[in-house]
Image (cartoon, grey):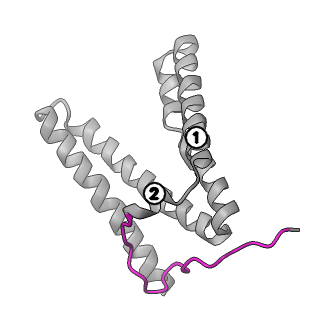
């Protein structure tokens, strides 16, 4: 049994979300290679499925969060299970926002100029994802 490190902030502990570009240098290059290889592998699989079973089936595989699985595994190993869980939560909020993006595009792409449809869809994704994060954070307090 290995010891795990859960020293990241707990959800709803009052800490603000911050962007720290310097953190991108922290993971070893090996971890970046694993993430890239896993993502490329899933994308290649989606391409093969598209050729064999058609674009609709291949599209389902493109929706697979390829990098998330590799990232969560590495985060759990390096930073602890709690931090990996927080990353999964953030990915979930982003994925739900992406559903909002898809709905907006599906409803507007034939009615509005493409740039407007994609702009409104992107804003929908951002607002929905952040609103879900804020709501869950507030509920956990």
| Residue annotated with mark 1 | 33
In the picture, residue 6 is in which quadrant? bottom right
Q: Main secondary structure of the magenta part?
A: loop
**Classed neighbour count for the residue bearing mark 2: other residues with Cα under 10 Å, few (<14), some (14–19), many (≥20):** few
Q: Is residue 77 above or below residue 14?
A: above
Residue 100 within the magenta-colored segment of the rendering: no
Which residue lies most toward the right here? 1
Q: Earlier in the sequence, mark 1 or mark 2?
A: 2
The residue drawn where x is 56% and y is 56% is 27
Rendering coords of residue 69 (x, y %): 62, 48
Rendering coords of residue 117 (x, y %): 18, 40
- Residue at disc 1, secondary structure: helix
* Residue nearer the viewer, 87 or 114: 87
Q: CA distance from mark 1 to mark 2?
A: 13 Å
- Residue at disc 2, secondary structure: helix
Q: Is residue 55 above or below residue 127?
A: above
In the picture, residue 96 is in which quadrant? bottom left
The residue drawn where x is 29% and y is 57% is 126
Number of dots carrying numbers: 2
Query: What segment is highlighted magenta in the picture?
Result: 2-20
Badge number at residue 24 = 2
Rendering coords of residue 10 (x, y %): 56, 80
In the picture, residue 52 is in which quadrant? top right
Residue 7 within the magenta-colored segment of the rendering: yes
* Residue nearer the viewer, 140 or 33: 33
**Classed neighbour count for the residue bearing mark 1: other residues with Cα under 10 Å, few (<14), some (14–19), many (≥20):** few
The residue drawn where x is 44% and y is 51% is 95
The quadrant of the image that shows the N terminus is bottom right
Rendering coords of residue 92 (x, y %): 49, 57
């Amino acid at each position: 049994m290995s010891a795990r490190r859960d020293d990241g902030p707990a959800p709803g502990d009052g800490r603000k979300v911050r962007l720290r570009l310097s953190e991108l240098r922290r993971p070893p290059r090996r971890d970046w290679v694993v993430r890239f290889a896993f993502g490329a592998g899933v994308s290649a699989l989606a391409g093969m499925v598209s050729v064999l079973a058609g674009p609709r089936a291949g599209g389902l595989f493109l929706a697979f969060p390829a990098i998330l699985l590799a990232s969560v595994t590495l985060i759990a190993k390096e930073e602890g299970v709690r931090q990996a869980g927080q990353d999964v939560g953030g990915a979930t909020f982003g994925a739900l926002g992406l559903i909002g993006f898809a709905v907006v595009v599906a409803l507007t792409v034939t009615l509005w100029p493409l740039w407007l449809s994609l702009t409104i869809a992107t804003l929908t994704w951002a607002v929905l994802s952040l609103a879900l994060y804020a709501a869950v954070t507030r509920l956990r307090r």
